[in-house]
Image (tube, coloured by chain):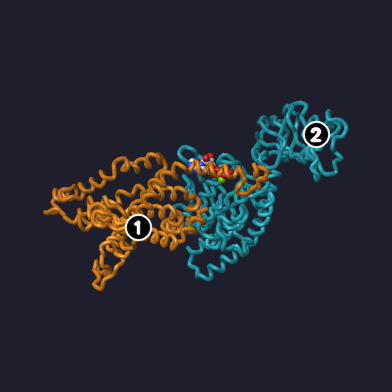
């Protein structure tokens, strides 16, 4: 039974009074996975994590951790440990005492516990700081103490609530790499909450994108980026250009065509679309090419005028305005910059291949 | 002017800006400072001075002498036994009363904390709405005078008081219980009741300040609720609890109103003796000496206590 999911949620609902903050959450998290919950502020990520930890009780639904039903199991008897958003370092204890806090609740000898604390200090690179008090630590060090304090208990699942959000950009990127490496080393399942999509893409094996208490899509970073299933996910992960219209044609091969004010578009269709449905054509900035003349077939072709370009070294970003609709379109080009429009800003065309775009319900 | 040409050294004490700021500080302090000097420092100094004089009949003998202090520590070969403790003093009353006062205050303080802590805990953790109302309710006893509160205990504990007549009408006792009033227990009960409200507020503040995620983290790390209380809540509320204890202990040691009203002959405390020496025995210098010694003993005990529990460490850790 070891490949059964470590966490199985089914129909989880959470209400605070009349406010429903989680709607019918049903999905599994696999053993040893680095799993992220990604979503805008207030979408219920922390609430879901707290339900997993046992700090909050679900209003409805069942939760299994390692095959065991968790109803009525308090936080102190769950095989999970949490790294809190604010770190929650105990101010009256030093670093060692903080890290060893949970070990006191286990049947461990003193020397065994001390050895584990020392090991954890090494793991998070805090050797020699064991006797420091909490208020003598920097933000990054506090974060490591919180991490070590949870890891040292060797939970089956480690829950992390935006542990990097309080750090500056450089330290955050450093800690991201360390966190990922650490997860590989210890092999514990990580459930990681973040509202930073780049962070989620960098770290995770799989990501659940949440919005307003719903899980919109669960997929690998590549899957989310290349095959978003909805307009919201498409807009949330990376940047995406959207052209709205109505479905005119659905091919059995999985392609569809839409017709809208900006033109006719063809792309890989979401299953379930039927002619007449409202839909959007979605195309990533780096998949669009800037052309001097209209493409022959008139499909996936948008007349546009250049508004601004910015050179970013490894790439250039161009903002164009569609002639027909006036909407802004972002285009990214490579470092060679040979498709950077030098001549005139007006009278340009944007084009892309049918396989590069998506047709999504919207 | 001759020194007008001397350039002002920046950052030195003579820097006019710094000087002005210091003066402003004293300006702000001055009303309190004036009050403290007039109402506290001067009387204490007078007391110290007087303790080195002697009473000669109706006259004060103003020659400097340690006679009063000598009298307090003069020993004898026949120690007075009080509750099995030998007091080898020729004049043992102050020493006995001192020890008794400390013991009674200690019991009262423990009782106060035992009552105040759960109430403060309840207010901090269980009350979510109308906290201000609860705080106002706690202060209601202060709306009546201390004397009235002490008298009301007389009515509750008295020979024909509420408890006795209540028990009698229930048929539980035939005769009124006499051990209720005019003894040390009555003093301790009255003192504890009078000071509970003072203790609740500092404890409440220190409990209220505890970050709730610390408690969640403790649970997450395997603590049961009880364990979590002893490992997190209690140590983090220690500064408030210690402050509350001192706030109750220090003033109650010297109280003389409560023993006078509900203490009876057995419930006298050191304050009663001081009052007696000043007003009845007409020996103000000796009374002053007793007061000074009492102050020194309390100051020493409190310092020892704070040192023993490492108060400085506690404070620095809270930061
Ligand atoms: N104890 C509570 N009582 C009432 N409402 C709550 C409570 N806790 C959370 N909420 C509400 O539930 C919703 C989700 O909150 P949650 O903290 O899970 O968001 P989040 O996704 O973690 O956001 P953030 O990224 O800002 O941390 C919010 O609208 C919040 O106001
Ligand atoms: Mg949150």
Counting from the top left corner in percent of width and height, residue B132 is at 40, 40
Say which residue label 1 marks.
B292
Q: Residue at x 44, y 45 (%)?
A: B33
Which residue is nearer to you in this view: B133 or A181? B133
Q: Residue at x 20, y 54 (%)?
A: B264
Q: Are marks 2 and 1 on the same chain?
A: no
Q: Residue at x 51, y 49 (%)?
A: A51
Q: Quadrant of ligand 2?
A: top right
Say which residue label 2 marks.
A350
Residue A351 sits in quarter: top right
Between tags 2 and 1, which lies in front?
Answer: 1
Relative placement, left or right, of A256 versus B243 is right
Chain that the image shows in cyan: A
- Circle 1 residues within 10 Å: few <14, some 14–19, many ≥20: some
Picture layout, residue B246 above or below residue A340: below
Q: Chain of mark 2?
A: A
Relative placement, left or right, of A234 versus B48 is right
Q: Is mark 2 in CB contact (under 8 Å) with mark 1?
A: no
- Colour seen for chain B: orange
Mark 2–mark 1 distance (CA, rounded to whole Å): 95 Å
Relative placement, left or right, of B123 versus A77 is left
């Amino acid at each position: 039974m070891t490949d059964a999911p470590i966490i199985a949620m089914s129909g989880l609902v959470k209400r605070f009074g009349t406010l429903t903050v989680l709607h019918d959450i049903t999905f599994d998290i696999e053993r040893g996975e680095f799993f992220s919950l990604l979503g805008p502020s207030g979408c219920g990520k922390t609430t879901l994590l707290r339900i997993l930890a046992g700090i909050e009780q679900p209003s409805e639904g069942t939760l299994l951790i390692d095959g065991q039903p968790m109803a009525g199991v308090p936080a102190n008897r769950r095989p999970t440990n949490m790294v809190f958003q604010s770190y929650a370092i105990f101010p009256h204890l030093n670093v060692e005492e903080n890290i060893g806090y949970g070990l006191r609740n286990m049947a461990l000898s003193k020397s065994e516990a001390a050895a584990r604390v020392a090991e954890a200090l090494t793991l998070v690179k805090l050797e020699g700081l064991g006797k420091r008090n909490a208020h003598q630590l920097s933000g990054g060090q506090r974060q490591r103490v919180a991490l070590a304090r949870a890891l040292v208990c060797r939970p089956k699942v480690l829950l992390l609530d935006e542990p990097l959000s309080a750090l500056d950009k450089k330290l955050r990127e450093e800690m991201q790499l360390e966190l990922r490496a650490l997860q590989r080393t210890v092999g514990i399942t990580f459930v990681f909450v973040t509202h930073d999509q780049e962070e989620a893409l960098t770290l995770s094996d799989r990501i659940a994108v949440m919005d307003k208490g719903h899980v919109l899509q669960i997929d690998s970073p590549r899957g989310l980026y290349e095959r978003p299933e909805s307009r919201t996910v498409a807009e949330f992960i990376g940047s995406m250009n959207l052209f709205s219209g109505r479905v005119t044609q659905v091919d059995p091969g999985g392609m569809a065509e839409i017709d809208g004010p900006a033109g006719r578009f063809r792309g890989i269709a979401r299953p379930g679309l039927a002619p007449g449905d409202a839909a959007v054509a979605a195309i990533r900035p780096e998949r669009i090419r800037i052309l001097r003349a209209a493409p022959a077939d008139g499909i996936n072709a948008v007349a546009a005028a250049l508004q601004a370009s910015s050179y970013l070294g490894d790439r250039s970003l161009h903002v164009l305005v569609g002639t027909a609709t006036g909407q802004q379109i972002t285009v990214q080009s490579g470092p060679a910059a040979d498709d950077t429009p030098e001549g005139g800003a007006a009278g340009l065309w944007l084009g892309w291949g049918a396989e590069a775009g998506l047709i999504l319900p919207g | 002017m001759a020194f007008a040409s001397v350039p002002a050294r920046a950052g030195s004490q003579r820097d006019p800006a710094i000087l002005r700021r210091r003066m402003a500080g004293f300006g702000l302090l001055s009303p309190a400072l004036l009050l403290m000097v007039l109402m506290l420092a001067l009387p204490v100094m007078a007391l110290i001075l007087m303790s080195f004089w002697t009473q000669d009949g109706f006259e004060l003998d103003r020659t400097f002498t340690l006679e009063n202090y000598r009298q307090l520590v003069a020993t004898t070969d026949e120690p007075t036994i009080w509750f099995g403790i030998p007091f080898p003093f020729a004049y043992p009353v102050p020493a006995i009363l001192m020890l008794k006062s400390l013991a009674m205050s200690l019991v009262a303080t423990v009782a106060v904390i035992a009552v105040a802590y759960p109430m403060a805990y309840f207010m901090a953790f269980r009350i979510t709405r109308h906290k201000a109302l609860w705080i106002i309710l706690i202060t209601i006893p202060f709306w009546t005078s201390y004397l009235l509160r002490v008298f009301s205990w007389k009515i509750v504990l008295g020979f024909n008081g509420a408890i006795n007549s209540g028990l009698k009408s229930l048929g539980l006792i035939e005769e009124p219980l006499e051990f209720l009033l005019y003894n040390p227990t009555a003093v301790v009960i009255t003192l504890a009741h009078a000071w509970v409200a003072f203790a609740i507020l500092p404890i409440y503040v220190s409990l209220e300040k505890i970050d709730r995620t610390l408690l969640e983290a403790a649970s997450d790390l395997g603590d049961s609720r009880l364990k979590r209380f002893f490992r997190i809540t209690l140590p983090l509320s220690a500064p408030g609890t210690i402050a509350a204890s001192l706030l109750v202990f220090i003033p109650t040691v010297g109280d003389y109103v409560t023993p006078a009203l509900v203490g009876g002959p057995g419930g006298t405390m050191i304050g009663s003796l001081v009052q007696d020496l000043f007003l009845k025995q007409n020996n103000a210098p000796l009374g002053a000496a007793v007061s000074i010694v009492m102050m020194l003993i309390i100051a020493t005990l409190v310092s020892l206590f704070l040192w023993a529990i490492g108060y400085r460490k506690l404070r620095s850790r809270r930061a």
